[in-house]
Image (cartoon, coloured by chain):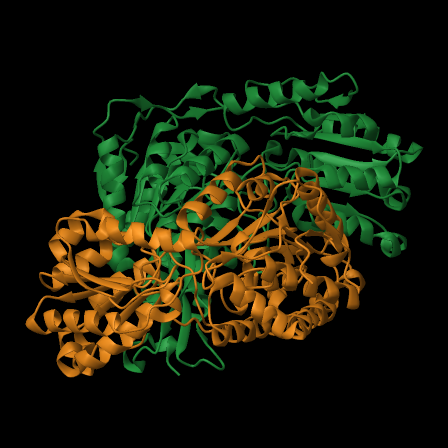
Chain colours: A green, B orange
Amino acid sequence: MITGKNYIGNTLSAKGTKTYQTFNPKANTSNTTSFVEATSEEIDLAVALASQAFDTYQNTPGTKRAAFLHTIADEIEALGDTLVQTYMSETGLPEGRAKGERGRTLGQLRMFGDLVQTEDWRNPTISGEHKELRQYLIPLGPVVVFGASNFPLAYSTAGGDTASALAAGCPVIVKSHPMHAGTGELVASAIQQAAEKTGMPHGVFSNLNSAGIEVGVQLVKNPGVKAVGFTGSIKGGRALYNLASQREEPIPVFAEMGSVNPVIITQNALNARASEIAQTYADSITLGVGQFCTNPGLILGVKSAELTDFVNDLGEKTAAIDANCMLHPNIHEAYKKNGEVIINQPEIELVAIYEGTTEENQAQAKIATVSGDAFLKNLKLHQEVFGPFSLVVQCEDTPQLLEIISQLEGQLTGTIIAQEEDYKNLSPLVERLQNRVGRIVFNGVPTGVAVADAMTHGGPYPASTDSRFTAVGNQAIKRWVRPFSFQDFPEELLPEFLKK
Amino acid sequence: MITGKNYIGNTLSAKGTKTYQTFNPKANTSNTTSFVEATSEEIDLAVALASQAFDTYQNTPGTKRAAFLHTIADEIEALGDTLVQTYMSETGLPEGRAKGERGRTLGQLRMFGDLVQTEDWRNPTISGEHKELRQYLIPLGPVVVFGASNFPLAYSTAGGDTASALAAGCPVIVKSHPMHAGTGELVASAIQQAAEKTGMPHGVFSNLNSAGIEVGVQLVKNPGVKAVGFTGSIKGGRALYNLASQREEPIPVFAEMGSVNPVIITQNALNARASEIAQTYADSITLGVGQFCTNPGLILGVKSAELTDFVNDLGEKTAAIDANCMLHPNIHEAYKKNGEVIINQPEIELVAIYEGTTEENQAQAKIATVSGDAFLKNLKLHQEVFGPFSLVVQCEDTPQLLEIISQLEGQLTGTIIAQEEDYKNLSPLVERLQNRVGRIVFNGVPTGVAVADAMTHGGPYPASTDSRFTAVGNQAIKRWVRPFSFQDFPEELLPEFLKK
């Protein structure tokens, strides 16, 4: 069922000569399918078809796009165990995770389908005092989506970016993630099936293979592309943002990138329930082998005997959790390298490291600690280590803790672990944290991102390139649309939902 | 009353040595006040004060910001005839226009004041199935506003950008437009008065003088600045956009720039009322000496005897309207130069030119015409000529007219002049035009931009750098805010409007 070819619209195509394979980190061996990189010609054709498709697709009734999205979900479901096995063979992640992520992906597709069943999402507006003006949201044009390594289903081929863009009326070209190209092709085939069954125009979706950066670069530079969605590293997202902003016609890039997701624990919380917090955080730090955008990589408290005990306890509990393999040897290598950069800073104390036997590609979880003084002075310690690693900062006092928060780069989330007796003193902390993050979690963990209309998944740079939008939840559709107004337009020619 | 100094927060400051004067185009002489350019030190201080002010200003209740905005309007009104006379002496525009624009400016300030009297504009959202999530909009931080040459009040010091940013909770630093620095200082003094009367933090507003680009460049590069608003030329807006996107932390730039505002006239409309249309457009082309962003610079029709007659009639009627002086000798020079570039293309026919006697700085209105073939081939003909100039394109047939529309750069507006018998055939035209513009006007003129919640003033690049927002109307506030979510936050600590 997996051919290794590109989908250029509804046509399988493999004109190139460069090939690559995906890797099974659990078996520590390459998978067998050879994926053929898209050529310049194939890329240009995909964009030309998307531009053509946009002419009709943008004007399809919402109910038809809803049917398309629901059918995509059904077709992905119909891939059944083939999809689950392929996913597992390309990620090393367990079956439960594969099925859970598939459920989330189907849920997102159906949610966006339901959203566009009516036209309310377009925010149709008739001015109070200027009834001659009728405004609504219209799609931008073809969107390029770069899938994420860590969510081969939920943030890749038919993930949140693709679902929200298709819902908005934008054709989508996916630059397939090379680590799960087989999973990507299966999902792409489901989208093509759905497009055919629901009568969508040829070119409404394409899926292009590439192991390097050339295909993505060419896509973002193509004048037919009108917006970009990306989930991944700061380096990758920034490179695409730079390309897009240097075009003759700059285009918006919504890149969801790095975050260390600071967690602040109060003394009262430590006094009341240090051991419980340590267990909750050991679990959160190692969840999915630490490969979540919202992994808690930084924990902050004011120094005390209880904080010292907590650090040691957190270390023990984290090190006691079974090791698992990371998504790819390259990701495992980066985890080791980036962790060592931090561990090798002079001020750092390594508290604990997983010491059981590990198989190939399995990550050793690590907890380290450092003083607030040292953290403030050494920006290397502010960098994300993607994987099961967390750094506990023992601040001199509350003012230093607040200063550290103000100095942090932009983050997806910030978490406050506190007791009721802290409430009256929390506002300086909340205000500072709010300026640095997109979401504040209270007495919980940042891992886990609900797909909901009040979710903000995004934040000040470098958490995302445009903090004015969210990547998760209904409102993610707003990234791909713009307001448009009719003035004095004949009532009979207006869309139904703009009539008086 | 005009000192020539900068307002660094509430303090008049003139540490620099570079000075410049404004110019009275009607008297053809410089005005007397010497304006002192802001120094690096003054710029940095203004940004530092704005960042400090943001800490408290972002958390002021909406009712207090509303009082601030209403008081700004009152203080500007209290400047009375001094403001009107200064405006006239720096623009050459007549008293009626000065007063009209003042009225619009006061109206905008009061509208944004009213908008933030309640917190509805923050779009407070409690998730249906995830009641633990509470989302609302929060301000980005200090905003830099670059005033427009052509609207010294409505799009400058206390214009739409400043009013919407202050309403959102963002401190504002204005880079004063050098052509109306005196008008700008008067308005800045009104804002400072209002800030003092309503107890706003020092640094919530600054006004910096500059005749060149250095002050603006330094402002946009300053890490304390979090967003930029601009109204002006494509060259200027793009330069700022490039600077902002090359920062270590890129920031959003909303630049409202060039537009030729295409007008399409059907054969049926020409048959029915060619002479009336010609008069309406002669008036629109010369309104404010053609110095509106929405000036109709391009008129399209399918060639016919009636279109030829219309072109000649439009030329005669335009040339019959009294000449008036432009805002500044530089703008007049650019008008002459850019007009000549077009007139000198081999395919162009100059239809009419104002031939009365002109005084210094007065523009000669011009109408030119060209075939659709020539227009398609020569991109120079697509460029805006800022001033009372319009080019009529006589297309070979309807398909060519549609092709030309698809080839146009992004525009603020597009206008359709048609009869009821055209309605059944309009959709190909409407669809193409919609992809190129932010607003379609029907049987009217594009000049005149209502301040209303259903207004879109913006459009695909280069009409604006981010078509996902509007620069005019209530919704302009969305440029300066981002979504933020509380998760599982104690009910008692939430803002009132996020409680269940």
Q: Is residue A203 visible?
A: no
Quadrant showing the C terminus of chain A: bottom left
Figure disc tally:
0
Which of A109/B269 is in front? B269
Q: Where is residue A240 in the image (x, y as percent from the top left)?
A: 44, 36
Compared to residue B50, the image places residue A177 above or below, namely above
Which of A76/B82 is in front? B82
Q: Quadrant of residue B120?
A: bottom right
Q: Can residue B142 be seen in this view?
A: yes
Quadrant showing the N terminus of chain A: top left
Q: Position of residue B218 (x, y in %)?
A: 59, 39
Q: Where is residue B180 in the image (x, y as percent from the top left)?
A: 54, 58
Compared to residue B224, the image places residue B318 above or below, namely below
Q: In the image, what residue occupies the spot 28% across and 58% down?
A: A57
Which of A251/B231 is in front? B231
Q: In the image, what residue occupies the spot 39% across and 37% down?
A: A183
Q: Residue furthest left?
A: B305
Q: In the image, what residue occupies the spot 43% across and 24% down?
A: A23
In the rendered view, does B276 fall on the left or right side of A299?
left
Q: In which quarter of the image is residue B415?
A: bottom left
Which of A94/A210 is in front? A210
